[in-house]
Amino acid sequence: MSTAHIITTEAEAIDTARALAARFREGAGERDRDRRLPWAELDESLASGLWGITIPRECGGAFVRQRVVAEVFRILASGDSSLAQIPQNHVEIIDLVRQTGSDAQKRLIFGRVLQGARLGNAFSEYKGKNVEDFQTRIRREGDFYVVNGEKFYSTGALFAHLVPIIAISEDDGRVYAAIAERVAPGLTVIDNWDGFGQRTTASGTVKIENVYVPAEYVVPAYIAYENPSPAGPQSQILHAAIDLGIAEAAIAKTIELVRHHARPWIDAHQDHAWEDPYTIAAIGDLKIRFNAAVEVLAVAADVTDEAIAAPDAQSIGRAKIAVAEAKVLTTEIAILATNKLFELGGTRSTLAQHNLDRLWRDARTHTLHDPVRWKYSTIGQYYLTGREPPLHSWI
């Protein structure tokens, strides 16, 4: 594991993301088609320094604004959304450690990240009655914690150096995050993700059988989950940005097809597809919705920064609602844009040689992370009755 570059400014973070996205865009379709896991691309991404931009300045990071975090992830997702989703959980655990870890834990864990360690994900389970019904258990044994359980949707775990595991304590019934070594005895990562989208994220199973984790690598995650905290909005911003990046890629490809490959419909009486009035209007509609989502997400990021700086029930509530509004718009434009790609691009856009269905599959899969239909209700209750949104991190 080599030392990663350390990014020090927001401009450098965005420029780095643009350069990486341009390279990752080439070959994204082939990686998806062949399900070739992006080891080399992840190493390049890690070495660039982007994985450390949310680490606090006092710990050696740039601690960029959430607006910049969103922009970085949108740019990366416009190149390859799988390569944007893999570091998503890495950033989330950095935020969790920042909020709940001791000073010593922050120095230890953030120091390893800045030296080039990737954090994975062993958060979610699919056997419980809902997303918060965790069966994984943790107990204290002297200077160690012992963890047992099974996880799924473990994006990034296969590629990680450290695998954060969310578990319920047998001692006090609260939620902890145990950050285990990827090579720890008893920790097995199984590459069995077979979803039709986000095919190269390796979001499969993690089995945890008597995994010993040193106490200094176990943080009291319940602090962020039992109290108003920016954990939810920060997590949701990343998801929204990835969806927006997929939409951006789809719109760009649609315009390319219309300009250079699609044929006009016979009743348009035009020589080129880009002269078709209905196509023109549809492109205008896509760009309006996309630009609106970009701006609403940027505002939501600013509101989240305010909540990070001064967290209380009201500021966290405002951030949750602002990000939920953005998530509604980014979900809608991701699905709409990836549908319109084929409608406006014509039948030839469906040919397997182009693999453009990857964009729709990625959008449809990633937008399922949490149900947008519930966000409408939460937003409406907030404005209509003043009811604060739930504490959990899925909003």
Image (cartoon, rainbow, N blue to C red):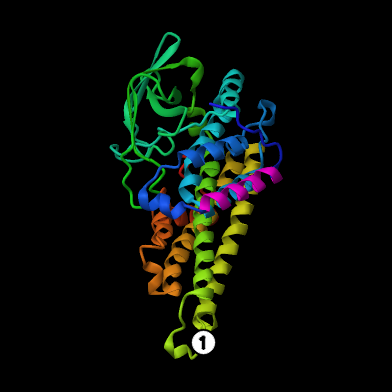
Q: Dot 1 lies on which element?
A: loop
Residue 322 visible to an observer of this rendering: no
Asked if residue 253 shows in the view, the reply is yes
Relative image position of residue 126 (x, y in whole percent): 31, 39
Q: Nearer the viewer, residue 298 or 366?
A: 366
Q: Nearer the viewer, residue 93 or 190?
A: 190
The structure residue drawn at horizontal position 51% and vertical position 53%, both measured from the top left corner, is: 26
**Nearer the observer, 16 or 312:** 16
Q: Is residue 355 above or below residue 68?
A: below
Q: Quadrant of residue 351?
A: bottom left
Residue neighbourhood size for the residue with mark 1, other residues' Cα within 10 Å, grouped as few (<14), some (14–19), many (≥20): few
Residue range (magenta): 11-25
Q: Nearer the viewer, residue 269 or 277?
A: 269
Residue found farthest to the top: 142
User: Does the stretch in magenta take in 188?
Assistant: no
* Relative horizontal placement of residue 41, taking residue 209 as reference (left or right): right
- Magenta stretch prevailing secondary structure: helix
Residue at position x 35%, y 63% from top?
Answer: 352
Q: Amino acid at mark 1?
A: Asp
Q: Is residue 51 above or below residue 292?
A: above
Residue 81 in picture, x, y percent from top left:
48, 50
- Disc 1 designates what residue? 271
Residue 65 location (% of width, % of height): 66, 43
13 drawn magenta: yes
Residue 51 placement (x, y as % from top left): 57, 36
In this rendering, position of residue 45 left or right of residue 353 = right
Question: Residue placed at 49% from the left, 71% from the top?
Answer: 257
Q: Quadrant of residue 383?
A: bottom right
Q: Residue at x 60, y 27 (%)?
A: 3
